[in-house]
Amino acid sequence: MDFAAARRAMVDSQLRPQAVTDPLVVGAMASVARERFVGEEAAAAAYIDRIVPLSEGRALSPPASVGRLLTELACRPGERALVVGAGTGYSAAVLAEMGLAVTALESDPALLAALRAVPGITVVEGPLEAGAPAAGPFDVILVDGLVEHLPDALIDQLAVGGRLGAGLVEGGVARLVTGTRSVHGFGSRSIADASMAPLPGFARPPVFTF
């Protein structure tokens, strides 16, 4: 399979039509070899616009969803980024290619070996919902998958002016959301409905009624 041609097709048929327009994002995603972040048996599906399984219960999100979040986050070289649920490291590698200082957080032992092989990033092992407070604060936090809620522990690791992007379940629908931390708090907005791979550890807290 001609993977270089598949990357070009991904840019032209998936990224650009879905508002992935930041030249830094497009350039990095056109450069990083996505097929290296999936199992050999799934390499042929690496550039299809769908979720690609990685290990039991974990998967790689579609490229357009990742690209759209990174575009909306307006990441810039030299910024400090945290990737939560980094998996085998694709999104972390894209951010590193863009010139950010990347910390990649992962909890799944089956994925950590591949993640540690990604050059130019710092790997942290631990529960995803706890973030990596010792490495913060961060200018950018990418929750690299679909979650039911965004815990305060992650938001607290943003610097003032820092941005967070995630896939979030809202009203039973998976949506891409971004938010910015200010001196007054954290405000978020929905961007678009989109498919993302679910992440463990982010179940919505129970609501108590009397």
Image (cartoon, rainbow, N blue to C red):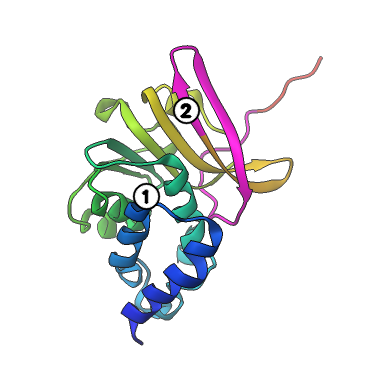
- Name above or below for residue 118 compared with residue 85: below
Please provide percent x and percent y for residue 27. 31, 60
- Whether the magenta-drawn stretch holds residue 63 is answered as no
Classify mark 2: residues with Cα within 10 Å, few (<14), some (14-19) or many (20+). Answer: many
Magenta highlight range: 179-205
- Name above or below for residue 91 compared with residue 104: below
Please provide percent x and percent y for residue 182. 45, 18
Residue sitting at x 54%, y 32%: 150
As drawn, the label of residue 180 is 2
Please provide percent x and percent y for residue 145. 50, 49
Q: Amino acid at mark 2?
A: Thr
- Which is more foreground, mark 2 or mark 1? 2
Q: Is residue 159 left or right of residue 180?
A: left
The reply to whether discs 2 and 1 touch (Cβ–Cβ < 8 Å) is no
Dot 2 or dot 1: first in sequence order is 1
Disc 1 target residue = 86
Question: Helix, strand or loop at disc 2?
Answer: strand
Distance between the alpha carbons at the discs numbered 2 and 1: 21 Å
Classify the position of the C terminus by image quarter. Answer: top right
- Whether the magenta-drawn stretch holds residue 197 is answered as yes
